[in-house]
Image (spheres, rainbow, N blue to C red):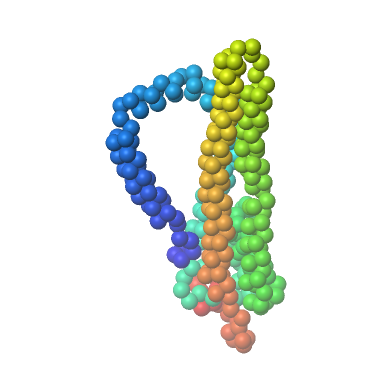
Amino acid sequence: MKGTASHRPVHEWLLLFVALIIVGSIVITCWQYFGGLESREELARKWTRDRLVHLLLGPEQVACYLCFTWAGLILIRRYWEVRCQRRVFHLGLLPTEKGVRILWKDAFALLHKLEDVTGKRPYILAQLIRTGLEKFASARSTSGVAEAVHNRAEVEMSHLAATMAVVHYLVWAIPAIGFVGTVRGLGGAFGADATDFALYIAQAKDQLKIAFDCTLIALLLSLLLMFLLHLVQRAEETLVLDAETYCQEHMLQRLYEPQHNHDDQSVYPGTRFAR
């Protein structure tokens, strides 16, 4: 399937690795030079077991974990589906030999082959090929075939975007839940009831910790989920673009309208494909 796969973001991941090395080297050097043993001990005293429990296991945090896990499972399933969809590119649904042309009569044979190989499963590449061949077979002309394939690709792209609505909602819901925890913590801080001023300050500080902890966890999960969403959406969009490119190279450029009756024949061995 040469020439049909879009450029993979290999360079982006390589640059990310280089960026991690550069930033990590600078941060570690600065930490060792300016931090020292006292700063590390002070950090260890602040982040005790109880502090980590309150940071990670609040009710709002658990709700954020649930939303994140739900969205993550959806994205994993969709990414796996993209991988399954890409296997169809290697099934030989269209002739790939050089010089092969497709007559309008050949469209019926290719459609039967398409049904036999894919079993009417909703593969995006198969849908685009089916649309183009049916248009070519019914019109007996190449006019409008490319537009029909492109329109079908747009429909598939819109369908993929529409079925991602739950994940988009969860991406929005996670920071919203964190904000609920923030409001709860701020309300508890201003509503602290204590006769002793020192006790009042201690209670207010505990409630403020709840507020900021909820916001911190929610924002971190939201950032990670948005990154995963971006990766899956790009994989799906690339799949549709590659399918349209495949149709362009192996179908649209091979469609042939014979000008004379004696040209309306195929010499491709075992088929009616024309060369």
Viewer-nearest residue: 199 or 77? 199
- Who's the residue at 58% across and 84% down the image? 263
In the displayed structure, 76 sits above or below 94; it is: above
Where is residue 29 drawn, in percent x and y? 30, 39
Give x and y (percent) for residue 88: 53, 56
Q: Can residue 258 be seen in this view?
A: yes
Picture coordinates of residue 59, whole percent (x, y): 62, 24
* Residue under the point 49% across and 64% down: 4
Q: Which residue is drawn at 52% across and 70% down?
A: 249
Q: Nearer the viewer, residue 235 or 195?
A: 195
Residue at (52%, 41%) from the top-left corner? 224
Q: In which quarter of the image is residue 107?
A: bottom right
Query: Can residue 94 be seen at all in this image of the molecule?
Result: no
Image height of 246 relative to 65, above or below? below
Residue 247 position within the rendered picture, expressed as x and y whole percent measured from the top left? 56, 67
Number of numbered discs visible in the structure rendering: 0
Q: Up-down: is 91 above or below 27?
A: below
Q: Is residue 124 above or below residue 62?
A: below
Out of 72 and 14, give the one closest to the viewer.
14
Residue lying at the far front of the rendered structure: 197
Image side of residue 56 versus residue 27, left or right: right
Q: In this view, which residue lies farthest toward the top?
A: 195
